[in-house]
Image: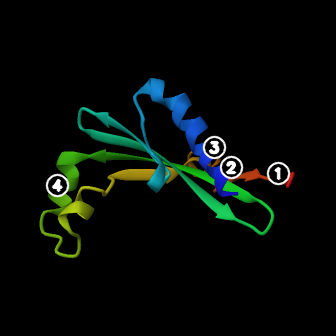
Amino acid sequence: MKDIERALLEAVGARIAADGFESKPVSQSFLRRVPAGRASLHLAFIKHPRDFDVVADVAVRFDELEDLINANNALLSKKEKGQTYSLGAELGNIAGGRPDALECDFVCRC
């Protein structure tokens, strides 16, 4: 299944690269710098014995807002403070008001 997950990440990355998104395969994320911060698309894989589901979420980071919020937060490292987001949601909740996952099943031809 790892090969299919990797292929899906590569395919999504190739499609949204034209919109300025940079692939971050290790974190299953795609990031795009915007004037006030950055936008993110993230894919999560929910594994089952014979298949997996894919859930997509989006987030926006406003650098100045996050700097204010995190300025006195001793619980986060400097690196972690740079990785927080201001607003985000799972796409199913945005589109239909409830979580949604794409089921990915396949036939293994081993």
The amino acid pointed to by label 2 is Ile
Residue 35: give x, y in percent of width and height.
Answer: 24, 32
Sequence-first disc among 4 and 3: 3
- From the image, state whether disc 4 or disc 2 is nearer to you: 2
Where is residue 107? Give x, y as percent: 86, 52
Q: Determine which of the numbered discs, if any, sits on residue 67 in the image.
A: 4
Tag 2 near tag 3, CB within 8 Å:
yes
Question: For the residues marked 2 and 1, what is the alpha-carbon distance in whole angstroms?
Answer: 9 Å
Disc sitting over residue 7 in the figure: 3
Disc 2 designates what residue?
4
Residue at image point 81% right, 64% down: 50
The answer to whether residue 21 is visible is yes
Q: Are the residues tagged 2 and 1 within 8 Å (C-beta)? A: yes
Mark 3 surroundings: few (<14), some (14-19) or many (≥20) residues within 10 A: few
The alpha-carbon separation of the residues under discs 4 and 3 comes to 36 Å
For the point 22% across and 54% down, the residue is 66
